[in-house]
Amino acid sequence: MGYISSAFFRSFLIQSSWSFERMQSLGFFYSIVPAIRAIHKTEDKFKEACRRHLEFFNTNPYMAPAIIGATIRLEEDGASDDDIKGLKSALMGAYGALGDSLFWSSLRPLAAVCGIIFALLGFVWAPCVFLVVYNLPHIFIRGYGMIMGHKMGIGIVSVIMLLDIPGKAQSIKKGILFLSGFLLSVLLFIVSGRGEGGGSYLWVSLIVICSVFGFYLGLEKGIRVEVLAFTAVVVSVVLGMFL
């Protein structure tokens, strides 16, 4: 349906207008208004739906299309006002937590580490690596959520759980751990004169091994990945002066 694709593309602007009182309410309304205009033919029904979707809404923007799709399905099915509001209220908090864990805490640091590694290796298209690693998964989740939300309606709750987002976030964090260790080895390789003087290789190898375990312990203690990454940069520069 045309209004589904319209809602998907409009959902990219869900954070374009904020208010402290209703958060992403206007962005959600902007995304769904073509759908409710097509579904509700009478002016009274349309106005009622508009008022319903101008209430408080706040979630992770990348997870919002799933809620938008499910809401459109309930509007098509003629669900009650309480059912539609209940769906939005139930999903926006849970999806916000899942999305923040996956994208802000896991995928974004992973993409940053990948981009930094390629930049340090001298590739001019390193920023493209960051954009691809970050945007491909998030655009897929947006599209998949919109399609399955509209298809399943309230059943989108079980569909999203099948994606095992917390498990994927944990796997990504483990990947960050090893990539961060590799990043540290690249930094040490560069600041120690690109390997000139073979005697430093043993020390570099030992430091990389220790850094991997150090990152693991840091993540286990709840230290943010960004803090660990900046620490790795400082340590590598200091050690590079003596290797």
Image (spheres, rainbow, N blue to C red):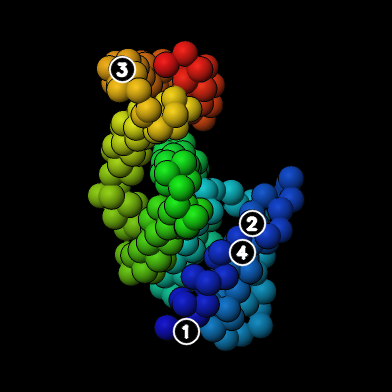
Closest to the observer: 78 or 192?
A: 192
Dot 4 crowding, Cα within 10 Å, few <14, some 14–19, many 20+: some
Q: In this view, which residue lies farthest toward the left? A: 162
- Disc 4 residue type (three-letter): Leu
Dot 2 crowding, Cα within 10 Å, few <14, some 14–19, many 20+: some
Q: Residue at x 59, y 49 (%)?
A: 58
218, above or below 140, in the image: above
Q: Disc 2 marks which residue?
A: 15
Q: Give me the disc on residue 13.
A: 4
Number of residue marks: 4
- Disc 3 residue type (three-letter): Gly
Q: Position of residue 88 (x, y in %)?
A: 50, 54
Answer whether labels 3 and 4 touch (C-beta < 8 Å): no
Residue at disc 3, secondary structure: loop
Quadrant of res 137: bottom left
Q: Disc 3 marks which residue?
A: 199
